[in-house]
Image (cartoon, grey):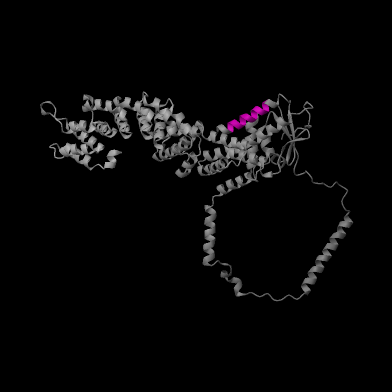
Amino acid sequence: MTGEGLTIGEGGMGATLPLDQVRELIVTLGKALRASQLYDQNNPVYKRFVQALSDEFGALWAEMSELVLSVNEEELVLEGEAVYSSRTRSDSLAFLLFKDGIRVLHFTPGFESEVPRFLDILNQARRAREDDDDLLTLLWEAEFTHFTYRYVDLLAEGVAVPEAGLGADQSELEQALEEARAEDEAAVSGAAAEEQPPATVSQDDFNPTLYALDAAEMEALRRSIEGEHARDVRGAVIDALFDRFEDGDVERRDEVFDIVDGLLPAFMARGEIAAATRILRQLRSYELAKAVSGPHVQRITELLDRLSATETLHQLIEAMEVGTISPDPSDLAGFLGFLRGGALAVLVRATFDTESLDLKRILGGAVETIARRDSDSVRELLSSDDEMLAAAAARIVAEQRIESAAGGLRDLLFSAHANVRHAAVQAVGALRVPTLMGAIVELLDDIEPEIRIEAARVLGSVRYRAGAQIFREILDSKALRQSDRREIIAFFEAYGRIGDPGAEERLDKYLNGRGFLGRRESSEIRAAAALGLGRIGSSEALVALDRAAADDDAVVRSAVARALSMDRGEAEA
């Protein structure tokens, strides 16, 4: 084994030691060791910690030509100054080294390239069972180039070995043996002389029911065992962790945050979303109750921002789609609901891309939760260059009535993409924004029929009387007569709703009037005019409808019957 004779302080270190820098390096070493236990070597989180540790070693060589640390049970010491201390043996780096005999660590420039191997060995030693190789053996097999160590033989440490010639002489030993033999014989003789009572055997000694459980006891035991199996041990541990957090000690809270930083990515990677959600719920409660100080609020914010990052969410969604993890849908929905607004774009995109209906439903629920909590993120999404995201944002505005986002809809009404324009029209209709109705009027002659229909319905629903003139022109147009039945009805009903003076007379002409040579409008136009009169609901409109109630055209009679059966409240709505 490598066991060079090193003197602490050798190596030409100056009188002023970079103690703070070394202490920070040891802290980073502890974090990297913890990361090596939680993540695979290809995991970005593990690589980030390893790189940070390597960088700190590289920076240290600008201050020192070598790093020599003494090891005792609770501390790592540099030139008489403790740079690491821990009284908890279960996760103590110092005790991990000390218990296997390591007494001095010696690092030299170039060790940064050996950091991953060093972490792996420490991790193996921490997980080692009784019959596994100890730390000394693992270090010896590794054959480090820039790291040596000093150790002691644990079998000899603290054991006094007697030297030859210092023992008792032969006569004294023989005398002691004779005395011991005499005492044993006397004890045996005395025991034989005492009268022993005869041994008795009872039938009860062989009765098994004396030690059996009755039915009630068996049932209680069964329930106890089932309860223990069903107990959420991980949740209990998390609760205990936050109980320590609530003690109020700043250093303890920092330690809890360090643990949480490692636990959350590990839970997500393993699909243990319920445990991750439990942590987020607790952190959010501290944040909302203002039960933590400024620095800790910042740490909560940074943590949630990291979880809401695009790369993190892509990995989580991909893992669910390929089946690497299969979290409970309710747990996943709860977890996604804690994410920041920055996650909105990723989740919206995923709802379109995924082929899983269950995942699409869960992601949609998360989008609603985030949008309800963070309207700023919705407004930001409205300006996205991605037409799919912009249209989705407009639909969210419509569904959740986000009035503060109304200003971002104007540009979408004139987007080059039909799906964006259609979603924007629906959003304006849902919000009933008066200042945007003029823009909606311009969409009555859009090239897309669905947009024209939606624009007409929006203007009718808000009774936009300022658009009456263009409606009159469209009702008289040849283009409308070449449109499909849905569009014709939409325009006539909208016109009936907007309350244009003289609308009853105009619609009556479409329904009952005759043109040159006694020709009437087509069945579709007359039926739509009847529905328009039904939307007006005035006495004049009802008189016009009565005149067509017995019309020869079945399509017209059906429309008239429907118009007459419209509730007056509906007609005025």
Quadrant where the N terminus lies?
top right
The one of 214 and 495 positioned closer to us in this rendering: 495
Residue depicted at 60% across the width and 74% down the height: 203
**The quadrant where residue 407 appears:** top left
The one of 529 and 504 positioned closer to us in this rendering: 504
**Apparent side of residue 494 relative to residue 315 in the rendered image (left or right):** left
Q: How many marks?
A: 0
- Check residue 56 for magenta coloring: yes
Residue 175 seen in render? yes
Quadrant where the C terminus lies?
top left
**Apparent side of residue 462 relative to residue 265 in the rendered image (left or right):** left
**The quadrant where residue 146 appears:** top right
Percent across and percent down for residue 512 are 16, 33
Seen in the picture, residue 162 relative to 67 is either above or below; the reply is below
User: Hey, which residue is sitting farthest left in the picture?
Assistant: 517
Residue depicted at 77% across the width and 72% down the height: 192
- Check residue 342 for magenta coloring: no
Percent across and percent down for residue 342 are 49, 32
Percent across and percent down for residue 3 are 74, 34
Where are the magenta residues, as a range?
A: 46-58
Percent across and percent down for residue 87 are 71, 43
